[in-house]
């Protein structure tokens, strides 16, 4: 590890050199963060959610690390849109199937994240993803959706996932198999307004987003915990990643008005256009939340039709 004059330090992450803030949580604790110290941060409501989630040491493509990765103060925004499943299928691996809300219609999401206090320090993130059926589950789409919404759990496949820091990119791409890259990415979420801007390689607009923040409802810690399972391929093997969100303040709107989503030029814009979304059906904003992101684990998914139909 060596210091740099800009207030950062260089660290090795599975053979990749990344810079992190000098004196930040990762520099001091390497994922084994002192919860008592985090609890003293005025931006963090409390840390009880994390005390009930012990970390474990695991081997991974980025070396030995602790899991889950804790996000002590986070805010998120999700815009959910309808799209025809035939467009979604063209962007999905053969092994995965879209989750249909009605025959021929699936769900596409554009998401923005701001992580103010995190084991790997502050960063922002954005995503274009689609809802998929749980791997190895052949039930009806409508039944899957009803169960998922009732239990506040969805399964997804992410097409693009830009981030604002090197450590988030290396961990996400090498460790989780997600399509991550680093770009200029601003996300601001408060009780009044939610805005985001993702830059493309030329410094222009890839995606930008702006909307009045829906009225927020506070929740006691642990009362509302949602989960998301994401599928990715690491070294040609399928993995699933579990993310748990402890929602502390959130609000939403069906068929929201006043949403500005600018689709410019870039990787996110290309992915969103390829999905051909038809109509925005839901806006959800969490102004205060906490997240536990687990390391991916191997999972079994169905063989693609092309492989099943092959003659020996």
Image: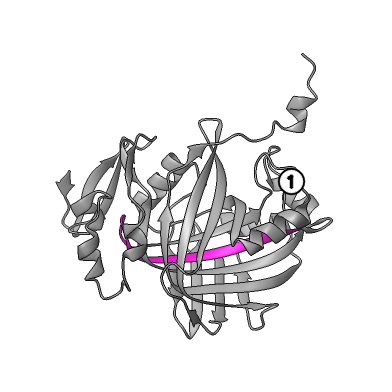
166 to the left or right of 19: right
Q: What element carries label 1?
A: helix
Residue at image point 64% right, 36% down: 301
* Quadrant assignment for the N terminus: top left
Boundaries of the magenta span: 106-121
Q: Residue 115 is drawn in which quadrant? A: bottom left
x then y, percent, for residue 56: 33, 43
Residue at image point 24% right, 44% down: 11
* Quadrant assignment for the C terminus: top right
Q: Residue 79 is drawn in which quadrant? A: bottom right
Residue at image point 30% right, 56% down: 119
Q: Nearer the viewer, residue 195 or 293?
A: 293
Is 87 situated above or below 233? below
86 to the left or right of 92: right
**Does the rendering let one see residue 172?**
yes
x then y, percent, for residue 249: 46, 76
Residue at image point 44% right, 80% down: 190
298 within the magenta span? no
Q: Residue 284 is drawn in which quadrant? A: bottom right
| Most distant residue in the top direction | 312
Q: Which colour scheme is used?
A: one colour
x then y, percent, for residue 253: 63, 79
39 to the left or right of 303: left
Number of numbered callouts drawn: 1
Q: Residues within 10 Å of mark 1 (few under 14, many from 20)?
A: few
x then y, percent, for residue 91: 69, 47
**Does the rendering let one see residue 84?**
no
Residue position for label 1: 90
Is 297 situated above or below 132? above
The secondary structure making up most of the magenta span is strand
């Amino acid at each position: 590890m060596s210091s740099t004059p800009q207030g950062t330090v260089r660290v090795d992450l599975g053979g990749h050199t990344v810079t992190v803030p000098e004196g930040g949580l990762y520099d001091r604790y390497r994922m084994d963060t002192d919860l008592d110290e985090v609890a003293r941060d005025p931006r963090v409501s409390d840390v009880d959610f994390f005390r009930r989630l012990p970390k474990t040491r695991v081997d991974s493509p980025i070396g030995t690390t602790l899991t889950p990765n804790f996000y002590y103060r986070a805010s998120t925004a999700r815009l959910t849109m309808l799209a025809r499943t035939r467009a979604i299928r063209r962007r999905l691996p053969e092994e995965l199937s879209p989750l249909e809300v009605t025959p021929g219609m699936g769900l596409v999401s554009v998401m923005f994240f701001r992580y103010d206090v995190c084991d790997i320090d502050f960063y922002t993130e954005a995503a274009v993803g689609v809802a998929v059926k749980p791997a190895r589950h052949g039930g009806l789409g409508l039944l899957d959706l009803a169960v998922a919404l009732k239990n506040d759990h969805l399964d997804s496949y992410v097409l693009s996932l830009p981030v604002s820091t090197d450590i988030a990119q290396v961990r996400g791409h090498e460790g989780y198999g997600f399509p991550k890259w680093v770009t200029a990415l601003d996300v601001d979420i408060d009780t009044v307004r939610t805005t985001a801007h993702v830059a493309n390689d030329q410094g222009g607009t890839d995606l930008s987003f702006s909307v009045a923040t829906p009225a927020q409802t506070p929740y006691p810690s642990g009362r509302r915990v949602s989960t998301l399972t994401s599928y990715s391929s690491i070294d040609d093997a399928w993995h699933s990643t579990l993310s748990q969100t402890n929602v502390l303040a959130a609000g939403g709107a069906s068929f929201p008005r006043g949403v500005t989503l600018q689709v410019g030029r870039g990787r996110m814009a290309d992915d969103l256009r390829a999905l051909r979304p038809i109509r925005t059906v839901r806006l959800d904003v969490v102004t205060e939340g906490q997240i536990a992101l687990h390391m991916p684990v191997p999972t079994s998914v169905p063989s693609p039709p092309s492989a099943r139909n092959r003659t020996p």
